[in-house]
């Protein structure tokens, strides 16, 4: 990161940060994308099982990754304030936090997997795949969390191309692992959807090894000497990071978990409906990586400018990011509308699943516009370290407005399963509007103070 003076310089720096993050996020989600597609080729039950397993795993891992994302604005603001000497201590404490969170999630998951799956009316094969998909992917959970902490540190310094390089190395390996474990190659049995969990767990380990090597040996990271000598754990620093990270993590959890809640509610429908829902939500989430990447870039840029007390520059980056998100939403909506049939065929060759997937995709078009504003604004607010209010806004918008609306549409109109998707649109739109209002208020408040 560096100081910019003109709008042109800001756009150039923003794109330098954004493009590697975008490639990284798309590639990371491509792992789940290929898990879903390749599991679907193993059978509808495997696809549905991975759908249920993902709906449990993804919200939890996204929540923890969200907590660890606090490292990006912390590092960005320390860099902007010329206090880089504090970074090694901060990152080491963050590694301790990531390990601790991994242990806590593992213990909780051990006791809750069976009871949660038992509450759902699933076919035996679907439940079996879902359970062991979660268990196998969970074996790579702690490496995944440590990697994301290191990635947030790397990105916070503005070196987003490093994260891109790591994921571009590991993604092809993930596809190979999927092929081996899902379909049973190299003398191994065909694990079906469970094999996708094994493949992802191994890929998480590869990501961690690559990130440690880079941080330890490559400039400018090796100058911080993160892995040379570890300091003792500091509860004060843990709480400081968690105060910022927990609201971020839970805000992401509320947004992501509402999709999982919809998947649970759809469990009363047929396996084909569940499979079609998962296929459509998987593709829509794939496109969501674009506004999410914009949000992560904004956190770094805004955090750097706020650390340097350049309030107007932070505001310029903010609106630059929102406008970018809206433009992308039009493009993403057009892709879904024009290529719905091709997208549906990616996930299944079963005609009923294809038709249901196409119907779900039409609703996904409207997701894009809510996310175009909501996701970038969340990234902006993280850059300001304003996270507590957004936590409550996310809770109300997604769970007290979106989900109940979906239930009403599904049960009291003829929309059936599609009613839940209409409720998602309502919740995401409510979140985008309230978050934008918070950003506008905060920026005006800071401008008056300065």
Image (cartoon, helix red, strand yellow):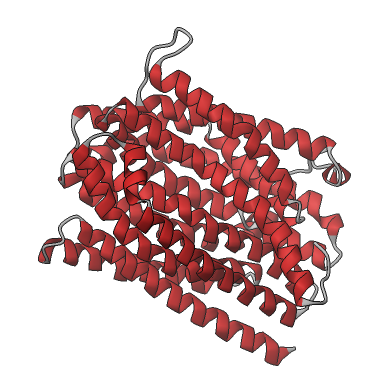
Residue 342, image x, y percentages: 36, 44
For this orientation, the residue located farthest to the top is 187
In the rendered view of the protein, which quadrant contains the C terminus? bottom right
Q: How many marks?
A: 0
In terms of image quadrants, where is residue 363? bottom left
294 left or right, relative to 63? right
Residue 439, image x, y percentages: 56, 79
Q: Residue at x 32, y 63 (%)?
A: 424
> In this rendering, does residue 426 appear at all?
yes
Above or below 196: residue 382: below
255 left or right, relative to 126? right
Q: Residue at x 84, y 58 (%)?
A: 84
Between 55 and 340, the one lying in front of the other is 340
Above or below 61: residue 198: above
Q: Residue at x 37, y 62 (%)?
A: 365
Residue 382, image x, y percentages: 61, 67
Residue 32, image x, y percentages: 45, 39
147 left or right, relative to 133? right
For this orientation, the residue located farthest to the bottom is 448
Between 50 and 294, the one lying in front of the other is 294
In the rendered view of the protein, which quadrant contains the N terminus? bottom right
Above or below 90: residue 134: above
> In this rendering, does residue 233 appear at all?
no
């Amino acid at each position: 990161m560096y100081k910019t003076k003109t709008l042109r310089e800001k756009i150039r720096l923003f794109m330098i940060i954004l493009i590697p993050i975008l490639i990284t996020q798309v590639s990371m989600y491509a792992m789940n994308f290929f898990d879903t597609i390749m599991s679907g080729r193993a059978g509808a039950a495997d696809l549905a099982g991975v759908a249920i397993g993902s709906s449990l795993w993804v919200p939890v891992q996204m929540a923890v990754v969200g907590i660890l994302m606090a490292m990006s604005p912390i590092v960005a603001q320390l860099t902007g304030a010329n206090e880089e000497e504090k970074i090694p201590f901060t990152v080491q404490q963050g590694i301790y936090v990531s390990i601790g969170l991994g242990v806590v999630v593992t213990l909780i998951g051990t006791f809750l997997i069976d009871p949660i799956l038992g509450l759902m009316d699933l076919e035996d094969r679907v439940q079996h795949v879902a359970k062991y998909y979660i268990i196998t992917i969970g074996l790579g959970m702690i490496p995944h969390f440590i990697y994301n902490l290191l990635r947030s540190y790397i990105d916070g310094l503005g070196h987003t191309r490093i994260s891109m390089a790591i994921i571009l190395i590991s993604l092809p390996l993930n596809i190979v692992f999927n092929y081996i474990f899902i379909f049973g190659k190299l003398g191994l049995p065909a694990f079906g959807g469970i094999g996708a969990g094994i493949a992802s767990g191994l890929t998480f380990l590869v990501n961690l090894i690559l990130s440690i090597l880079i941080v330890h040996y490559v400039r400018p990271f090796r100058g911080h000497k993160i892995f040379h000598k570890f300091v003792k754990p500091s509860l004060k620093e843990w709480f400081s990071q968690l105060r910022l990270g927990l609201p971020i993590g839970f805000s992401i959890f509320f947004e992501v978990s509402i999709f999982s809640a919809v998947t649970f509610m759809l469990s009363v429908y047929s396996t084909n409906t569940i499979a079609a829902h998962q296929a459509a939500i998987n593709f829509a989430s794939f496109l969501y990586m674009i506004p999410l990447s914009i949000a992560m870039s904004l956190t770094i840029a805004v955090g750097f400018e706020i650390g340097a007390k350049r309030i107007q520059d932070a505001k310029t980056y903010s609106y630059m990011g929102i406008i970018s998100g809206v433009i992308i939403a039009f493009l993403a909506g057009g892709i879904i509308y024009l290529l719905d049939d091709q997208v549906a065929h990616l996930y299944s060759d079963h005609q009923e699943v294809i038709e249901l997937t196409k119907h779900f995709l039409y609703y996904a078009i409207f997701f894009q516009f809510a996310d175009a504003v909501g996701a970038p604004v969340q990234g902006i607010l993280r850059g300001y370290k304003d996270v507590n209010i957004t936590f409550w806004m996310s809770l109300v918008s997604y769970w007290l407005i979106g989900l109940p609306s979906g239930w009403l549409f599904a049960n009291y109109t003829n929309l059936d399963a599609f009613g839940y998707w209409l409720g998602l649109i309502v919740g995401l739109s409510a979140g985008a509007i309230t978050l934008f209002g918070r950003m506008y208020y905060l920026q005006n408040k800071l401008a008056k103070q300065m």
